[in-house]
Image (cartoon, rainbow, N blue to C red):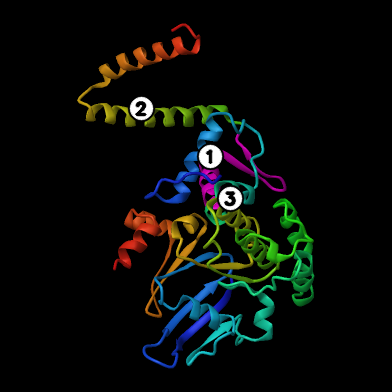
Amino acid sequence: MSLIVECRDLTKCYTNGRPAVANLNLTLESGRIIGLLGPNGSGKTTLIKMINGLLIPTSGEVLIEGQKPGTQSKAIISYLPERTYLEAQRTVEDIINFFDDFYEDFRPERAYDMIASLGIEKNARLKTLSKGTKEKIQLILVMSRDARLFILDEPIAGVDPAARDYIIRTIISNYNPDASVLICTHLISDVENILDDVIFLRSGNVVLRAGVDEIREKVGKTVDQYFREVFAC
Amino acid sequence: MAWEMKTDRPIYIQIVERLKMRIVSGEYPPGSKIPSVRDLAAEAGVNPNTMQKALGDLEREGLLHTQRTNGKTVTEDEQLIGKMLDSIAVEETEIYLTKLEGLGMDAGDGVNLVQRVAGSKSKYDTGEL
């Protein structure tokens, strides 16, 4: 097990008010599936964007395998943002080629296998596909890389329960003990069975880091129930 | 479809129970090879590390063996499997007796009930009714 991400006193302030992420310390090791959980506005997406080098920290630092985010970290992190950035005019095949050009660790055969198992036409243009199908394609692209860290921001929001099952199976069957998966979601009960650990964020800080079975054993509650208790409004 | 998990108990313990049922019921016969960790994890909808932990438990109990190159197989020790079956049956019976107690009944009432219900069930089975 090796260290993939390390955050040291990480802080991000936007122009007004309190920091979105405040003096956060966190490490992520390889071989784990980790849930990043927290109420709206707790700093989940801000944290993820700093790890991906899309936001610059106000102070403190984030290190990816010991290096600041940059070209190298992007080569080893596979990121599923909350919103799609794929061009609607393009075909599925176009986009697979695009990813293949872009990422050295992209495995097109894996993507084609998954596309075929879902019965998606590779000549179909994205704009002709349903929202759920587009989300599945986006996830397939992200999971078809041999990345060291997968960061999935809300991978199952907005798809039906059967599609959720498919997405969760996809995450499990692409699991690799050298890599880690960080899943950020509100739909805790749907994902908690596949998580090793959970991180609870509140007001930009870690309030709990624990194993899923540890929570069940100690508190006698599911992570979903425990979350509702900790963050009761 | 993922395995249904009861809410409040550790997931790996529930997986151990499921897999034991498969072994004692003969779904995984003695000496047979069981699916890979990854396949089982995908089927159950659980984390592969959790599945690995559950399989480790079964291995410590002697129900599974690791073949160096060939994954995991079910033990050929049918006596051990028989013992496991017996202990599961005893556990289930204890649960039943506790429920009867809640209804103000005792083991004797339970025996009568089992005979009565099992009797009427076999009538259904043979289509007599």
Secondary element at tag 1: helix
Residue where numbered disc 3 is placed: B41
Question: Amino acid under label 3?
Answer: Ala
Horizontal and vertical percent for residue A42?
40, 76
Q: Earlier in the sequence, mark 2 or mark 1?
A: 1
| Residue B68 falls inside the magenta stretch | yes
Residue B116 occupies quadrant: top left
Q: Earlier in the sequence, mark 3 or mark 1?
A: 1
Q: Quadrant of the N terminus of chain A?
A: bottom right
Question: Amino acid under label 2?
Answer: Thr
Residue where numbered disc 2 is placed: B93
Label 2–label 1 contact, CB within 8 A:
no
Q: Is residue A35 left or right of residue A113?
A: left
Which residue is more in the foreground, A112 or B65?
A: A112
Q: Earlier in the sequence, mark 2 or mark 3?
A: 3
Q: Distance between the Cα atoms at labels 2 and 3?
A: 30 Å
Q: Is residue A159 left or right of residue A97?
A: left
Please report, as a chain letter, where disc 3 is located: B
Horizontal and vertical percent for residue A88?
69, 70
Q: Residue at x 38, y 30 (%)?
A: B92
Q: Which residues are magenta?
A: B51-75
Q: Check the image and report above or below for B112 versus A36.
A: above
Residue where numbered disc 1 is placed: B19
Please report, as a chain letter, where disc 1 is located: B
